[in-house]
Image (cartoon, helix red, strand yellow):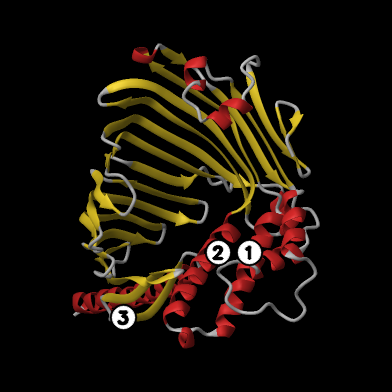
Amino acid sequence: MAAAGVAVVGIGGYLAAQAVVGNEVEKALVESFERLDRSPSLSVSDVHIDKTLFSTTATATLAMAGYEQTTAELDMHIDHGILKSPVTGTIHPNEAFITGDIDIDMIASMSGVEGQLTADTLKPAEAAVDGAMTGLVIDVSYTDENRWRVDTQADEIAFTRWVDIPPFRVISPHWAMSTQDEESESVVQRMDIPRLEITTQGLDVYLEAIEFEAVMEPSAKADVTQRPVQNQNGSFRVADIGIDDTSIGSLSMTILANNWDGQAFQDYHEDYANLVFMKNRFEEEPESVDEALYRQTIDRVIENGYLFLSASPEVAIAPLDAHIAMPTLGLDFKPHLSAQMRFDGEALSREALDSLAYTSDLVLIDPPAAQGGMNEEQANAYLLNRIYFDVRLTTPPREVLMQLPLLVGLMIDPALEEQTLTWDRGQLTLNGETVM
């Protein structure tokens, strides 16, 4: 009898633990779907969570913001484990967009989630596009916002037909993104592509050993703007570039992007895409466009443009170094290029952005009654005076100069070792001489 009592107590404790795990799973799913829906790039709808004592199933519809017709159905099954819970399921893209499923195989525990998303073949459904991604594997590890990693690789991405894009083949691409460490807010990105092949104008062009690495970290502007403004500094390298299996050179550069409000930048482009979609629909069915929604989208475009520019974004190539060797043309050239561009967003006026937004070809409605402090010409001049750029390039050899268009060739001073082009406070100079 005592043994039976112990067994009953043990079973009761196990069932109680299962119930606790089920509650935690349900809570985690609700929080995850809400977090995804708050992201600027995704929306989540039709969420259904069905919890039993030993397992939980969840379904939802995922859509890309700005492309709501591009959806995927998520179907997950979680077995309740006291220490670890297996998570399996499928992400099924809308077959009007992509054919092929992504399988889920992960383990959830109190310390986080880890596992894989895999797909044998994903193909675009559009008749005008012919290509596929094969052997996709996405390794995921998530503990918290300061400890996570996404590691993606594929066997091949190849397209033989895609509108105006020439046929290309990407062999064994690998991309990884992770937090740097628990003590910082930095995120590290790395991309490796052993070989990229492009067929264009009858030539077979290849690039080998493509590498990109970057670190994103909060900018000092983030404390001032209270926005997720970041600095991103990285390097890009192509070890070998060739045509028809003949090497013609290499390329490397350092890229600096400071004071970038990435969220505002992404939101701007998504709302801009919505404007394009609404304009196209308006041209086909004018009565189908919601004018209030149209105005709200324009206002968001202006607001996110303002947020992005007011952070004073900067971008620089410092420097780009290349080696171009074509013995048949007697050419062995090592160009060196540096470029810097920045926007002064201090005390930026919204009037200029309002004026340019409501004079855009995408706007089909009248501006607000209170709008109109600047006309289009004044707005352009105001914003151009806040732009600075400076480009410096090693003077090409005579063999290259002879191949350039006449107008470009006349602008270059072959007596100088370096050509400079600068725009500062509305004035353009070439090699120190004012152009306009």
Q: Tell me the kind of residue under disc 2.
A: Asp
Q: Quadrant of residue 49?
A: bottom left
Q: Is the C-beta separation of discs 2 and 1 under 8 Å? A: yes
Q: Is the C-beta separation of discs 1 and 3 under 8 Å? A: no
The N terminus, quarter of image: bottom left
Q: Quadrant of residue 79?
A: bottom left
Which residue matches tag 2?
267
Please report whichever mark, 3 or 2, sits nearer to the chain's N-terminal start. 3
Q: Is residue 429 above or below residue 81?
A: above
Q: Position of residue 286 (x, y in %)?
A: 48, 84
Q: Is residue 151 above or below residue 124?
A: above
Residue drawn at x 47%, y 16% is: 399
Which residue matches tag 3?
51
Q: Position of residue 267 (x, y in %)?
A: 55, 64
Alpha carbons under labels 2 and 1: distance apart? 7 Å
The C terminus, quarter of image: top right
